[in-house]
Image: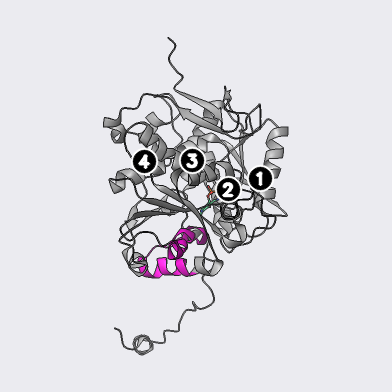
Amino acid sequence: MSRPKDWELVCIGCGTAAETELPDSTCRRCGDLLEIRVNKEIDRGSFFDGEGPGIWRFKRALPFPPDVEPVSLEEGGTPLVRTDRFATRLGLHNLYAKNDGQNPTGSFKDRGMSVAVTRAKTLGAKALICASTGNTAASLAAYAARAGIDAVVVVPRAGVASGKLGQAFAYGARVFGVEGNFDQALATVFDLVRKDGRFYLMNSVNPFRIEGQKITAYEIFEQLARVPDYVVLPVGNAGNISAIWKGFKELRKWRIVDSLPKMIGVQAEGASPLAAVISSGEPFRPVKEPRTVASAIRIGNPVSWKKALSAIAESGGRAAVVSDEEIMEAKRRLSQEEGLLVEAASAAPFAALIKLNLPREAAVVCIATGNGLKDLSDHGGDHEIESAVDSDSIASSIGSLP
Ligand code: F0G
């Protein structure tokens, strides 16, 4: 009897198995997205004892042979911190932030980029390309540099945080801007990879990205020593919600856990096509001109929308929508009450908690997807440096303390 392959690429639409990924990562037969199915034997007793840099300690769960040479910056392993002051106001008792801003380039993108760049290197890719609202660009640029491969990033010409662009330039990527939003940038990149065989696509349609990002689920389970009741996260192109859900489902398949969290995807009011499907029951329709202060999730046509809807439906979760004001208020409170500086998109799940009314005792993990240092543009004009004439002037300006 022939042994099943260690892993395979399977189309999420028609179920066809693919031998290898096309440059645009889609199914040769029906054009839908491909997903990796890991068939390896997983020893649950030693699952968390693996060795390797960063996420590569879980390499048994990844689509590579044991002698793989990872392109790694020791990504993952980010802190899971309690946010008690934020939680108390909401009446929640077990609220955590998975602080993915502490990844090597400051966002959750690094786990997936490590895996996908390792794959690209194995395939001998000449140039790596992505469309991005900023974080993917920064992450790709860094990992491509580490692998010694050229990186090209395509961004909306306006509206990308300067810190993220600065990172892409600093790591040596070529940066192109489209007149338009992320959706147009991604369409341009798809067009290019289909026409020109030199480029390997690094957006989250690339199933190897998802394989890296799924490890977030393993980390959360390990850190919490249980499966959380809810995982709440911002949704843009919808890769991360699909990936984390995949990770938890694998843990259950391998009998490492026996329950699953409910997945709650949070979108900004002006960019919420997924939430619209769930609330209206109507078919998926892209938002033409997505608008939100949270530039990372300013996306109207999330490419992994089917996977995200499945994650929400299968897990019994929900979609939530938050306004820009709610996002900025949550962002302010996280930094001033918890010491957690996240970017606007990453404050969205915390903003959603205010209206979600989750059970008080529930264990809730919000994914703080990106570091606030990347985007300091939205702190408003009320932060002027006060004049210090001498020590007495500071003391009298401060006045009495509580
Ligand atoms: N949070 C942050 C900070 C992001 O940068 C992104 C996506 C998301 C959440 C949403 O994740 O796309 O997997 O649903 N940023 C992408 C980029 C689009 O280009 O950096 P998603």
Q: Earlier in the sequence, mark 1 or mark 2?
A: 1
User: Which quarter of the rendered picture does the N terminus lie within?
Assistant: top left
Residue situated in front as seen by the camera: 108 or 262? 262
Which dot marks residue 112?
Answer: 3
Q: Main secondary structure of the magenta part?
A: helix
Q: Amino acid at mark 4?
A: Tyr
Quick check: 155 left or right of 113?
right
Residue 254 drawn above or below residue 327: above
Which picture quadrant has residue 293?
bottom right
327 left or right, relative to 133: left
Magenta extent: 329-356
User: N-terminal of the two: label 2 or label 4?
Assistant: 4
**Mark 4 or 3, which is nearer the eye?**
4
Q: CA distance from mark 1 to mark 3?
A: 18 Å
Q: Nearer the viewer, residue 374 or 328?
A: 328
Q: Which residue is mark 1?
A: 186
Q: CA distance from mark 2 to mark 3?
A: 14 Å
Q: Amino acid at mark 3?
A: Gly
